[in-house]
Amino acid sequence: MNYKIYWRNPDSKENHLVHASNALDPALHVLEPTLDQAVNSHGSLSFKVLPTNPEYGSIRKLMTVVTVHDGDDLIFRGRVIETTQDIDGIVSVYCEGELAFLCDSVHTPFVYGGSTATPGDLFRRLIANHNAYTTSIDNSNREKLFTVGQVTIPARKGYTYSADTARSTWDLLIDGLINQLGGYLRTRHADDGTTYIDYLADYTGTAQQTVEYGKNLLSLEDGIVGGDIITVLLPYGGKPEGVDARTTIESVNNGKSYIKADAETIAKYRNIWGTQTWDEITDPGQLLQAAQSYLNAQKEALNTVSAEALERVTVYFAEVLADAADEVPRDETGVCQLDRKAVLAGAASAYDGIYEEFPFLRMETGGVKPFGCSSALSVLRFTGFYFPFTGEANVNMDSPSAYLPATVCHEMAHQRGIISEQECNFVGILAATRSDDPAYRYAGWLEGYVYLSNALYRSDPERCLAIRETLPEEVRADLRADSAYWARFRGPVSQVSETVYDVFLKTNGDENGVRSYGMVTDLLVTYFDG
């Protein structure tokens, strides 16, 4: 068999080859490709992409359409629902079949029936409504359209079905037809690009069996599916006293029964319809506020790493940090004492370890300078700063030396044109941990561990403290020394300086201000969690 995997993004008209089982070029092979097809389910596909693959880095969650071909036959079509990347840069890709597109449209409450009503007519009505919703706002979702094909389910007249709440097309097909009458849903593809959907009484196609050409068939039950994300929301409230209909928002929303997510989310995921019900709300204005809050909370959740992933990466940093602790010099109390001048001298090669992965960071800079009055920086609670008008990076030479190499790498990230503090933190930590210099490596793992453990403490204090207990005494001595040093400078001056610096960051393009220093944990978890 000659299996091929292609993918295509919405802004491209061509399919791009990702895998060919008979390709001589090793870059055109993915790892562990596994295809699972079953009747009346979305189907799934999973595989791993190496950094050497020519299409590496171009995949987009919920946007990239993936197809699998057996010779000239198209045997799977679907979309990417999740990707994860391990420490070696290998990207695991999880896809759901095209029937999952039916999760992205909703139907308002309805009653179907009549003397001539048949299951086939209900099927056609549901698919027509799905297509109407898919293109109701724009035509960017045409990949999700279906054309009704063969309908061989018995035409039983007088068929009735009702839905008292808004539900997705997929739920209605399963509940209103498959669970009631049986039968099978199948998709077919014509040469002109039309996707047909059939409702069959009997099914003899090969898709009833699992087509597996890899190992370790993966369950996707915990993945993000189309129905989990809503970008166009139909909100429903409760029924006011004496009224048999649920509250809607048309009267306070310019006649529209739906609201859309922000432009950034729409651009990322396109239009995915969904519904939510608030039985306790009967006021249209309050319902509109609840719906807007729902979409805002969803956006924040989409951009937040999971607690489990945060814990895994925190544990990983703690383990590597423990090993690195023996490689740096310490004083008689066990606290790390680096030669600060040697640290600055090593700045010239600090980024050498990440140029291969991030070649755009390779450039000549003016190095890093010690700030003449470092104690004043400590009063302001600054470990360093970058002066954009001269391109100078300055570091605090008075603060604990264990963290100095990480600060150097952070300020050098600014010199390379990175404005965002979260990105500078991430790049700085990554550069330090990839360095050949033990002092830089230790500082990078230490700095990253502090950010991660602080974030973990806010969600799970007990687990955070348990991980801290696994650290060797040398690391804990450095943590105590750092806390004791900065405790001396807490007060009104440091609070004012943080407020001023927050304004400075926002003025210079970092909309998150000082909060972006904490957001580095998202980048660390996304990069290191595999």
Image (cartoon, rainbow, N blue to C red):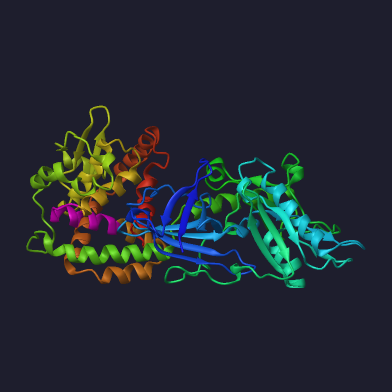
Residue 468: image x %, image y %? 28, 68
Q: Nearer the viewer, residue 202 or 353?
A: 202
Q: Is residue 41 above or below residue 490?
A: below
Give the answer, above or below, for where 201 lies relative to 90: below
Query: Up-down: is 331 above or below 414?
Result: below
Bounds of the magenta segment: 435-450
Q: Kindly identify the residue that appears in the image at 50 percent across and 70 percent down.
A: 219
The x and y percentages for residue 258 are 69, 47
Left or right relative to 261: residue 300: left
**Residue at image coords 51%, 57%:** 69
Residue 72 in picture, x, y percent from top left: 53, 55
Q: Is residue 483 visible?
A: no
Near-viewer residue (283 or 46): 46
Residue for point 69% across, 58% down: 197
Residue at x 55% of width, y 58% of height: 73
The quadrant of the image that shows the C terminus is bottom left
Locate residue 80, reporting x and y percent: 50, 55
User: What secondary structure do most residues of the magenta stretch adopt?
Assistant: helix
The residue lying furthest to the top in this view is: 389
Q: Give left or right: position of 252 versus 97.
A: right
**Residue at the right extreme?**
115
415 relative position to 120: left or right? left
Number of numbered markers: 0
Q: Is residue 99 visible?
A: yes
Horizontal arrangement in the rendering, residue 440 relative to residue 499 (left or right): left
Residue 436, magenta (yes or no): yes
